[in-house]
Image (cartoon, rainbow, N blue to C red):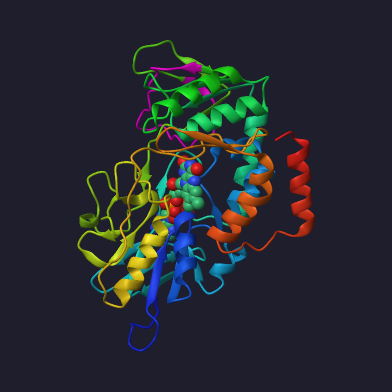
Amino acid sequence: MAHDPTSLESGARPTVLVIGMGDTGVLTAGHLSRHCRVIGVTTKPMLVSGQELGLRLTEDAQWRRNYLTPLDHYRRLRRVEIIHGRAARIDPIARTASLELASGEQRCLNWDYLIIASGVSNGFWRDDRLDTCGVIESRLASQRAAVTAAKSIAVVGGGPSGTSAAFNLKRAYPNKSVTLFFPAEELLPGYPQSTRRYHRELLARQGVDLHAGHRAVVSDDLVTSDWTGGRLDFAGGQPSARADLIIWAAGRLKPHTDFLPRDMLNPAGFVRTDACLNVAGYARIFAIGDVAATDPLRCSARNWAYKVLCRNLLAKMKQRALPARFTPPSHRWGSIVGPQSTGLKLHSPSGKSRVLPRWFVHWLLYPLVVRGFIYGGVRSKGLASFARDSWLDDNQGR
Ligand SMILES: Cc1cc2nc3c(=O)[nH]c(=O)nc-3n(C[C@H](O)[C@H](O)[C@H](O)COP(=O)(O)OP(=O)(O)OC[C@H]3O[C@@H](n4cnc5c(N)ncnc54)[C@H](O)[C@@H]3O)c2cc1C
């Protein structure tokens, strides 16, 4: 295995290794790159965001413009060394990481500080496979083709992903039968009551067939990332259901933590992380995003937690007390079904909601606030493709 004799703080800038370049890895690596040497290890050469599942299945141009971006298009990542590979093991005492590279080789890296941002597997749309851009694109295309071919679609799970998938599928394909099965009496656990009620009524109005109290049986050998149809059975003994396509959004999360020492993890396998986003017992290791057990909702992918992490890491390098704390909201918030032709409806943690007009979302929120301000600039895919995407948006009545 090749060994990388990287700097170890003596004179040179400290090395921060970020494991996982998804939604949070990209943000933290970009923000730290002005201050230290940053290396990002990533299973995918593009950011394949886990956000907006419903739009991913129905509005290809719109989703890919905001949620599928080659990493070399992010301006803030210009100074970040990106390694296409997977972390196989870390040694917190020796401060090394063993990597399996996409090329098939292995590599060992030294680091001064480590950020764990490796996320979770969740259904078919989040995983820790080592993929090329070509594989990512062909998988997206075959999923779109399966949606188009299916006459009946069953969505399993009443969280934000299942709700968004069911709503957007029925809106985009009113002639298909779309059924949503969820185990509780209400959708959207963790959201305020008014948000839950609003979405139940919205789905019913859209024509989604709702089946509360239906807990689908997931046998041990069933792979819920499969992309097939068939029969669904229910734990409560209700009659089985059949669909041409079953979309599993049942919240069976698997944290990507196999490469970490066991004592860093809680019993469910998530990284034990305090309010400073510091991993319990490891002063030089931080964690963020879906993998970090910061709070019951594990919501540090949002709520500006990357700023907390960056401030604390920079303070740690200067041997100062950690200045920032992550304060999770009491309830989940945000948009559930994503931007629609009527605008973007945002739900606050208190249950209030407001609609951002479509022009604002299209021309200001995504290009200026998200891509420009939050991500620090994303190199455009070219004027021609932007014009084509905008034309598609405008002519598909979004
Ligand atoms: C700006 C912003 C807005 C958001 N808005 C919403 C919203 O409105 N509604 C909502 O529900 N959620 C929202 N979210 C949250 C979002 O849906 C998820 O919580 C987020 O995608 C999780 O990000 P992550 O970085 O933890 O994981 P991911 O984005 O899944 O990234 C993890 C990456 O690490 C890779 N990886 C795994 N193991 C390894 C390994 N061993 N070595 C190397 N790489 C590895 C994975 O393959 C993946 O590429 C938002 C997040 C952000 C940043």
Residue 299 visible in the displayed image: yes
347 or 51, nearer to the observer: 347
Dividing the image into 4 quarters, which one contains the C terminus?
A: top right
Q: In the picture shown, does residue 231 fall above or below 36?
A: above
Residue at 44% of width from left, 39% of height from top?
333
Picture coordinates of residue 230 (x, y %)?
A: 52, 22
Residue at 39% of width from left, 11% of height from top?
238
Q: Is residue 96 left or right of residue 207?
A: left
Q: Which residues, given as a range, are shown in magenta? A: 210-231
Give the quadrant of residue 384: bottom right
Q: Is residue 199 left or right of residue 388?
A: left
Q: In the picture shown, does residue 166 fall above or below 44?
A: above
Dividing the image into 4 quarters, which one contains the N terminus?
A: bottom left
Residue at 69% of width from left, 60% of height from top?
380
Residue 128 visible in the displayed image: no
Q: Main secondary structure of the magenta part?
A: loop
Picture coordinates of residue 234 (x, y %)?
A: 39, 18
Give the quadrant of residue 94: bottom left
Residue 183 is one of the magenta-drawn residues = no
Give the quadrant of residue 368: bottom right
Residue at 41% of width from left, 61% of height from top?
307
The count of marks equals: 0
